[in-house]
Image (tube, rainbow, N blue to C red):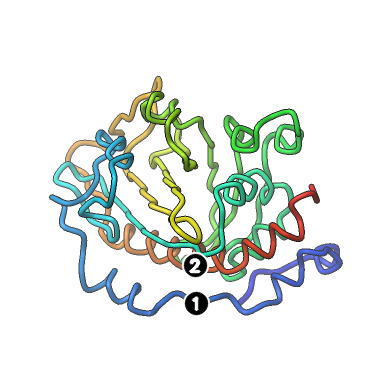
Amino acid sequence: MAVPVTPQEMQSPEYKYYLRDMTAPDPDRYLQIDREPLDPANALTIEHMNDLFLDGYLPGEFGTCVLPNGTAVVANLLKMPGVTIEMVDWWFAWHGLAPIRYKMWDKDEHYDIHTSDPDRRRNPAIPMRERYWDTFDLVSEDNFGTGPREINIHFRNPADIGFDPEKLAAFDGTIICAGDEHAPTVMCHFVRPIPGGVEFRSRFWVGYSIVDGKPVKVLPEGKSVPAQQGKLMLRHNVKEYTNLAAILPEVYAEFKNYW
């Protein structure tokens, strides 16, 4: 069932995207999540996040697993034809400014969104990717199938969570990342251009926080992240980003100057 919208949202120019059927992921992706857990030996640990800058691909680009220390890694690889790096940075600056924009991204599971600093998001004097750095999106979403829950997403400069500043300066893509001392999960979307579009190489490191610019394990000793949690997170990520890939070029063309 689609999330509810207000009468005001029904009058918005974005509402037509909410009315569309979502683009469904390849069903084999869901089957792979259940059939083929990621080998922990192939999972990218948070301490080695800079390996994402290496050419080519890493062994564990898709899947989820629980590591020997009890934390979990969730990994997704998704190609987005027709999408540019500029569109991606614009989307993360733009969509948090109105709940209908979050709802049209995933109308089954995205209930609400509010950003902490709308003036920064709209400020043309700030480079687009920096407009969402050091801001928060308070979202309400149902990514576990148990009903909506609130998540506070603290977007960061990638250098502030552990990415190498020299490698960042030479990188021709963008990195959307979130994490702080309060959140028990660190998020990273490592986006690089490919012929005809971009590809998202996403990682969620569950059981870690960012403290003083470095990842710190906060999962209590002797505890483990439930394997099912990682599977549900990956299913949600596959679903929402498959739909975003389908709509983003059109949404950007229509709304890139509509703040």
Q: Amino acid at mark 1?
A: Ala
Q: Nearer the viewer, residue 202 or 65?
A: 202
Instruction: Give the secondary structure at mark 2.
Output: helix
Which residue sits at x=63%, y=62%?
A: 249
Q: Residues within 10 Å of mark 2 (few under 14, many from 20)?
A: many
| Residue at the far top in the pictured view | 212
Look at mark 2 in the image and give the residue it sits on: 242
In screen coordinates, is 59 left or right of 4? Answer: left
Tag 1 near tag 2, CB within 8 Å: yes
Instruction: Give the secondary structure at mark 1.
Output: loop
Residue 88: % across, % down: 57, 50
Badge 1 or badge 2: first in the primary sequence: 1
**Eyeballing the image, is 60 above or below 146?**
above
Which residue sits at x=86%, y=67%?
A: 11
Which residue sits at x=67%, y=36%?
A: 116
In screen coordinates, is 106 left or right of 118? Answer: left
In screen coordinates, is 239 left or right of 209? Answer: right
Answer with the quarter of the image where residue 141 lies: bottom right
Q: Amino acid at mark 2?
A: Thr
Look at mark 1 in the image and give the residue it sits on: 24
Residue 62: % across, % down: 29, 60
